[in-house]
């Protein structure tokens, strides 16, 4: 399909940015896939979040992968999942002949999980709140994974908290549906929540999100990052402090980084790094933080763990 025809046939298209009825107020953040703005809908007066993603246009038009992503976003939105941020509109703006601007207009929530953690009193987050937010997070991740979407950048800043205190996953648009041979570039996934296979530039699957969720759950317990690395090598060293240094058989042969760069370490329990964990949450996180991504449970399996069957939920 020619690019002109595709633009005109899109569900929510605009001829230029001036024709949009949104007024940008300020930048909320910049991620691996684009910039997010806080904006006002001049028609309704509502405050929204607009994510701008620039898509290159080739001689063959807009990449089919982009068309699939936009169609999938609209499909997901029809499900109206309680733990996924609501998508109001998708708008395409032709900036120039070789570039398309895609605007994803989402509901705006004032607070994210990072804000919530920072504002906690010294007593920390109540166990019942940690348990409920962890359940809501895994429920949202299970929904995405069931639709073959890996978020790939789960972190407290991408988890929004509604005025009623419920968690919603944001910033998953145009994140690419997955196959089992993808590799993440270094710009994807914030360092502290990055799975070891990502740090080692290996193939990955949806379990990269499970690793990130485990790091986030631990952070809710301790009010600080579980693996606050200062570089990719330091991040790996902090991970190995928990998982133990991989064996020579486990170490990937395709990278230049030597296993001997890291000191020998034996595996530990998550509770040794995050003392606030209860026995049930410690057991759950020990599974989710497995060095071997094939050993990590799915989001659905995590939700069936004993941790979510205990008081106070």
Image (cartoon, rainbow, N blue to C red):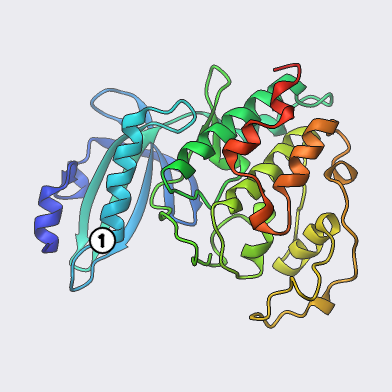
Direction bottom: furthest residue: 256
Task: Return the x and y of residue 259 as percentages of the image width and height.
Answer: 79, 76
Q: Nearer the viewer, residue 255 or 19?
A: 255
**Is residue 225 in view?**
no
Q: Is 123 on the left or on the right of 16, as rendered? A: right
Task: Quarter of the image for the N terminus: give it.
Answer: bottom left
Q: Nearer the viewer, residue 214 or 233?
A: 214
SS label for mark 1: helix
Q: Is 79 on the left or on the right of 32, as rendered? A: left
Task: Return the x and y of residue 174 as percentages of the image width and height.
Answer: 38, 52
Question: Is 131 situated above or below 219?
Answer: above
Question: Is 102 situated above or below 204?
Answer: above
Q: Residue at x 44, y 41 (%)?
A: 26
- Provide the residue designation for mark 1: 64
All told, the count of numbered labels is 1
Can you tell which quarter of the image residue 245 is in?
A: bottom right
Q: Residue at x 16, y 47 (%)?
A: 10
Neighbourhood count class around disc 1 (C-alpha, 10 Å): few under 14, some 14–19, many 20 upward: few
Can you tell which quarter of the image residue 114 is in?
A: top right
Q: Nearer the viewer, residue 181 or 56?
A: 181
Q: Residue at x 62, y 29 (%)?
A: 135
Task: Return the x and y of residue 80 as percentages of the image width and height.
Answer: 37, 27
Task: Return the x and y of residue 128 as percentages of the image width and height.
Answer: 72, 20
**Is residue 181 in view?**
yes
Question: Is 55 situated above or below 47?
Answer: below
Task: Quarter of the image for the C terminus: give it.
Answer: top right
């Amino acid at each position: 399909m020619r690019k002109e025809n595709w633009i005109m046939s899109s569900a929510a298209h605009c001829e230029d940015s001036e024709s949009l009825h949104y007024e940008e107020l300020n930048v909320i953040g910049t991620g691996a896939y684009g910039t997010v703005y806080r904006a006002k809908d001049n028609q309704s007066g509502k405050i929204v979040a607009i994510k701008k993603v620039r898509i290159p246009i080739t001689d063959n038009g807009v990449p089919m992968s982009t068309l699939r992503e936009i169609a999938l976003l609209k499909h997901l939105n029809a499900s109206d999942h309680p733990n996924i941020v609501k998508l109001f509109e998708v708008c395409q703006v032709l900036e120039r002949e070789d570039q398309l601007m895609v605007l994803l207009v989402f509901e705006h929530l004032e607070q994210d999980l990072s804000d919530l953690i920072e504002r906690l009193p010294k007593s920390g987050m109540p166990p019942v709140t940690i348990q409920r937010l962890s359940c809501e997070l895994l429920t949202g991740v299970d929904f995405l994974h069931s639709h073959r979407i890996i978020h790939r950048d789960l972190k407290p800043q991408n988890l929004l908290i509604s005025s009623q205190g419920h968690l919603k996953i944001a910033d998953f648009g145009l994140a690419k549906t997955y196959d089992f041979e993808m590799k993440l570039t270094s710009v994807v996934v914030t360092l502290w929540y990055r799975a070891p296979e990502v740090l080692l530039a290996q193939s990955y699957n949806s379990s990269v999100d499970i690793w990130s969720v485990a790091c986030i759950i631990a952070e809710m317990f301790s009010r600080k990052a579980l693996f606050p690395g200062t570089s990719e090598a330091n991040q790996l060293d902090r991970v190995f402090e928990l998982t133990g240094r991989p064996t020579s058989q486990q170490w990937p042969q395709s990278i230049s980084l030597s296993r001997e760069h890291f000191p020998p370490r034996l595996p530990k329990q998550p509770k040794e790094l995050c003392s606030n964990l209860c026995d049930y949450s410690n057991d759950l996180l020990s599974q989710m933080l497995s060095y071997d991504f094939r050993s990590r449970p799915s989001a659905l399996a995590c939700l069936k763990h004993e941790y979510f069957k205990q008081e106070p939920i």
